[in-house]
Structures are given as C-alpha cells and as structure tokens.
Amino acid sequence: MRWLKKILKGLNNSTLNERFPRAGDGPTRYPVIKTESNNSSPDERTRTDDEDLDHAMALSLADKDAGRPNGFQGRQDDDDDLSRAIRESLNPPAYPPYPPRQFLPTRYKICGACHREIGHGHYLSCMGTFWHPQCFRCYACGLQICEKEFSLSGTRQYHRICYKELYHPRCDVCLNFIPTNREGLIEYRAHPFWHQKYCPSHEHDGTPRCCSCERMEAKYISLGDGRSLCLECLDSAIMDTGDCQPLYHGIRDYYEGMNMKIDQQIPMLLVERQALNEAMEGEKDGHRHMPETRGLCLSEEQTISSNRVSSGLLGMKTQQQKLVRRCEVTAILILYGLPRLLTGAILAHELMHGWLRLKGFRNLSPEVEEGICQVLSHMWLESEVIPGTSMPSTSAAGAASSSSSHPKKAGKSDTEKKLGEFFMHQIMHDTSPAYGGGFRAANAAVGKYGLRWTLEHIRHTGRFPL
C-alpha cells in the first residue's frame, strides 16, 4: 500500500465534485480530484491521510461497480435466494412452518350417508348418489350390504332377504312366503271381509274352511258331518238344544219388544246336518239357501233325529222324536255347532217365518218372505254387536225383558263382536236373488217406511212398498 500512500501524500483537502455512481444510474461519472499546495501540519496530514484512504477505498468500490452491467444487483439477489432455498431443502426443519396444502379435484364426491368427501379408493354409485362401501347399509337391519344384488324400495336399500321379510306377503294358513306364479308375480287369494291372504294351492289341497266364518285354518275341529270349525268359532259354539234354549227365549222376547209377540210355543231343536237335509226334502214350502241350509221352519208333521250332548263333544247321542202338527208351524230346526251369534241370527230368521205363517201371510214370493226375514236377522245382530242400538219399538217392558235375557251381551269379546260383524256382512252382500236381493229391497222399505207399515203393505199387496 506504500505506492498508494505516495500518491495520496501531499494531497490537501479534496472535494468530490460528483456523487458516487450507483448501479442503474446510467453512464458512470468518475470524480475529479483536484491537487493543491502542501502546506498542512503533520497532524492535519495524518488526519487527512486517513480520510484520503477512506475515499480511495470508496473509489475502488465504485470502480468495481462501474465495471458491472445494469441490473446485476437484482440477479445477484436471485442467486442468493436460490442458494438459500437449496440449503434449506437439504436441511429441512423438523416441523413445517405451515400446514400442507390440500389439493381437491374440481368435482369431488360426497357420501350420501355420512356426507363426507369420498377420497381415493373404492366407492359405490347408486340412486344417483355416491357412497362409501362401509356406509351403504340395509335400512331394515342396519348392516352393510356387501352382496352384488340388493333390493330397493323408493330411496331405501335393503338386503334381499330383509326386503322379502318386510314386503313379501306370507300365507296366513301355512305361514310360508306366498310363491310367485309363472310370470314371476305374487299371486294369492284373499277373503273379502277378513282380508286373509293364502296360497292359491290351498283351495285344492284339502285345507279345511270354517263352516261358520269361512276362513281357512290350519287348526280346526271336525264336527263329524263333513264340517270343520275354527278354534275362534268353537269358543262360543252351541252344541246342544238345551244350551240353546236361553238364546231362543231371548230372541222371542226381542220380537215381543217390537210388538210382534209369537203366541205359540214353537219347538226348537238343534240337529245334525243330515237330519236338516232330510227335513228340508220333506218340507214343501221351504226355500233352500245355497250353498247350505242352516235353519228350517217346519209346517208339517215329521219324525226327525235331535241331538243330546252329555259332556262336550264326546258322548253325543241322537234320539228319535215325533213332532205332532197342531198348527201351521211345527218346529224350528237349527244346525248345531255354530257360534252363538250365528245361531241367534238363524233363529231370528226362522222365527220370522213362523210369525208370518201364524199371522196369516200367504203365498209370498221367495224374495219378499226371505228378504223380510233377513231384515229381522240383521236387526237382531245389530242390537247384539253395536252398543246402544235400540229396538225399533216403543215398548219399554219388552226392551227390559230382552236385555235381561242376554247375560252374555255385555261380556262379548272382541272376537265375538268381529264374528257378528261378519255375519251382518254376509247378509248385506249375499248374492242370491231371494236372500241377497230380497234383503236389500226389504231393508230399503223398512228404512223408508218403518217395519210395521212395511209389514202391513206386504199383507195387502204381497210386495214391498216403493
């Protein structure tokens, strides 16, 4: 550095006429150094030498900067940043300074069950919705549906067996699933009143049908004359003539309460099926009710077999009894083994036949006579089944007598009431011209004109009033 000191030795105070150049200032302008006489003291020269040295170093740096092109400082900064990034990538910190960035597809999928995003992996597409495999579950049992085949009901998915348990009908007789027909459709039979569903094959495989309520039953009791009785009808069935006497007298009191007293004590017998058929063949004036007659009002002298039961269904004995004709009505025969309400409905029907004959109604057509008898049967059933139903009469004494003669009326079970509703349904929807058509015509006349005026019109004209 001696040569530099020699150059600067003896220089007096110098003044920079121009500023130091900076990068980006355009053409570089160097400072001009002016030389003056050397008259300074030693101390001043020493201080001046130090200042001159600083200026020389600054000029040296300025010369270096002047030799660089414009914009060099920016590229150097970029190089520094690049080297710093390389060092940081080689020595990453233990924890990232910010959470990793999540990249989502432009149209990501949402599970239809848990409503969360479906990421990479397996997923299901059903009913226009996406599902996690573990979220696609049966609506009935709640377990995952892993099978390739499943059942749908609206927007709900089921296992095939769960769907079958819920929606496939079972036979009310054999309790199995009702099979499909050749076309793959579920075909079954149903009762119009009970809505009982059963396999079509039961109509031909010997499955018994109750002779009272017409339902097919797997459990039943045989009455020994080709008839079967279900256990519900058996609960209130009347098997013996003696057991039927209170019911018979109660229905006679019911007639008396409507001012239709039956003066003659008409014999009443419960008989077997064969005895009823034989008596029907001998009765010239009787009207047959197909498919089977369950009651008959006799008007001729006949000898028939009646039933006497010692204990339950066992020990049943038959005996011959001669009916002697003393008037127009000989006896009323009722088929044994029927429920109480059905037995009473038949008794009410046959007593009306007896009342018409005793009161001199002659030569009535089957539609008129059977129709008005069915009206009385329906009216009695209605008084037994529907609470608060009053008799079409103003006789308080007769009503009190009728109520006192029916100890079971207040204690009928729901099953027995349902049976009574079915027997009323049978009367209203009977398809035969005499019993069905006659009832509907007679019921319309009674509803319009009343029972007594309708009977007077029948007596004089033999027809229902219009």
Image: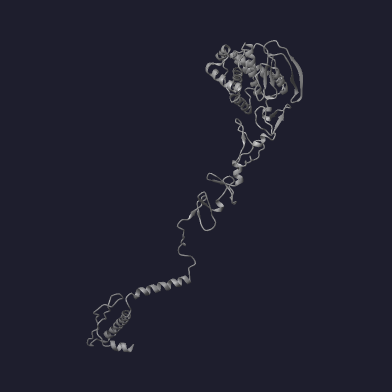
Asked whether 382 or 193 is in front, the reply is 193
Q: Is residue 75 visible?
A: yes
x, y percent for residue 277: 71, 21
Query: Is residue 328 rendered to the left or right of residue 84?
Result: right
Image-quadrant location for residue 249: top right
Query: Is residue 323 rendered to the left or right of residue 145?
Result: right
**Display colour scheme:** one colour
x, y percent for residue 304: 74, 18
- Residue in the picture at 34% in, 87% down: 1
x, y percent for residue 46: 29, 85
Asked whether 118 or 102 is in front, the reply is 118
Q: Is residue 381 visible?
A: no
x, y percent for residue 95: 48, 65
Indicate whether 352 appears above or below 235: above
Image-quadrant location for residue 434: top right
Query: Is residue 164 rendered to the left or right of residue 50?
Result: right
